[in-house]
Amino acid sequence: MMLKLLIPVLFSVSIFADVDIDQNGYILYCPCMGRFGNQADHFLGSLAFAKALNRTLALPPWVEYRFGEPKSVQVPFSHYFQLEPLLKFHRVVTMEEFMENIAPKVWPPEKRTAFCYMARGQGTDCNAKEGNPFGPFWDTFNVDFVQSEFYGPLNYDVHHQDMARKWNNRYPPQKSPVLAFTGAPASFPVQIENKDLQKFLVWTPRIVNRAIDFIRNVLPIGSFVGIHLRNGVDWTRACEHLEHSPNLFSAPQCLGYRNEFGIASQDMCFPTPDAIAKQVKFAVKEYHAKSVFVSSDNDHLIPFLTKALKRMEVTVHKLANPEPHVDLAILGRANYFIGNCISSFTAFAKRERDANGLPSGFWGFPSNIVSATKQKHEEL
Ligand SMILES: Nc1nc2c(ncn2[C@@H]2O[C@H](COP(=O)(O)OP(=O)(O)OP(=O)(O)O)[C@@H](O)[C@H]2O)c(=O)[nH]1
Ligand SMILES: *[C@@H]1O[C@H](CO)[C@@H](O)[C@H](O)[C@H]1NC(C)=O
């Protein structure tokens, strides 16, 4: 008799001693769009979404693409960012922790529903695992979906229309403890209301130390200007779309979300080397910089800039083996930063600097404002 009573008690105690289950449920998603800059924009929106619905956010790994590899590689969230600062804002767990300790209790294999706005690709369901990185992402955690749920017309803008309450009414946590999305529950570029959440994204010591080592050991003593040159072939193609979309990608970061500060131009998207040198010279003078740090996906223009700046007693540098996250952490610490307004990679550095009260500028902006407004007036 005694034993019979004791066993269930002990059993339930041990379950709850291991992990706390959030009675308000969880949000999972695949950062299935774009590379780091895009995923970071989406992350901020997803964090705001989880907070508004009051569900714990499972921090997904970052999806990376390695040259020559057919499948995406998933890098744990905590490889790049600390958890403690995020926890100050909202409840989060890593996806690894969720799958290992929480999923067995709230998300058994037969309950795994994929959430999407409407049917994806060929067919009549979310096809959550169709294509790269969709399949490789969920395979990382051995997740298969047994059904689909179309959540339309609900959306992710939790700052308007009482949207969070609508989600919770339609999907109460008791009935749907886990909302697993085929893509980020967020918009791109990041919604203006969510930009400030950047301050909770803090690099791990591993990344910060590499940035600090470089600044201390490679750059000369004194202030430095950091620049981002986005100039690979994919970018040439991206800039060709400017004509049809004057607020392309991350352009709202300088032009405003309603183009209130102008429209995007080629000078902003793909500045000429001469235009770059001119802006850098100006910044070097203004900030009494001793060096220039260049971050780029393709051509760092080191010989060109070294020559262009040779009368100024400044040196021009890049990382010996550029790694995007270390590049960003260095840009985040420059005394002044010039970036590409259209790029979400720039946007990450810009937001981090804003959070720390550091000044930033953009190629070809705002010098084109005059001609842009002039043009508008002429059109009118
Ligand atoms: N190391 C390094 N990589 C960069 C740099 N600029 C771009 N990249 C790489 O190119 C990718 C660009 O994709 P995103 O980060 O999504 O940013 P984006 O510039 O908006 O580009 P799109 O994806 O084409 O919209 C980055 O994630 C990096 O992998 C840079 O300055 N340094
Ligand atoms: C949000 O969720 C937490 C944890 O589940 C809970 O303690 C808290 O009461 C919830 N807040 C609201 C406003 O429902």
Image (cartoon, rainbow, N blue to C red):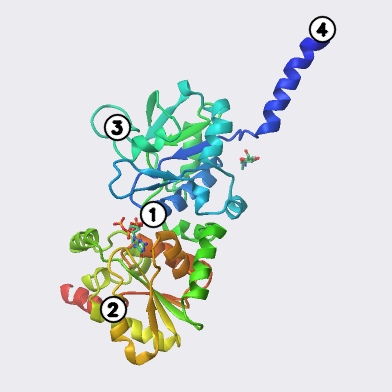
Q: Is ligand 1 closer than 8 angstroms to the Cβ of mark 1?
A: yes
**Residue occupied by mark 1:** 36
**Quick one: SS at disc 4?**
loop
Q: Is residue 276 above or below residue 174?
A: below
Q: Residue at the spot x=33%, y=63% of the render?
A: 343
Mark nearest the camera among 4 and 2 is 2
In this view of the protein, can residue 343 be seen by the observer? yes
Q: Earlier in the sequence, mark 2 or mark 1?
A: 1
**Dot in front, 1 or 3:** 1
Name the residue tied to disc 3.
119
Distance CA(mark 4)–CA(mark 1): 59 Å
**Is 74 or 379 nearer to us in this picture?**
74
**Snapshot quadrant of residue 18:** top right
Residue 140 image point, x, y percent: 43, 36
- Residue type (three-letter) at the residue carrying disc 3: Ala
Q: Nearer the N terminus, badge 4 or badge 2?
A: 4
Label 2 vs 3, first from the N-terminus = 3
Q: Secondary structure at mark 2?
A: helix
Tell us which disc is closer to us: 2 or 3.
Answer: 2
Q: Position of residue 144 (x, y in %)?
A: 40, 27
Q: Which residue type carries mark 4?
A: Met
Dot 3: few (<14), some (14–19), or many (≥20) neighbours within 10 Å?
A: some
Q: Which mark is residue 326?
A: none
Q: Residue at x 47, y 56 (%)?
A: 194
Instruction: Give the distance between the C-alpha atoms of the residues marked 4 and 2, in whole angstroms.
Output: 84 Å
Q: Earlier in the sequence, mark 4 or mark 1?
A: 4
In the rendered structure, which amino acid carries the disc numbered 1? Phe
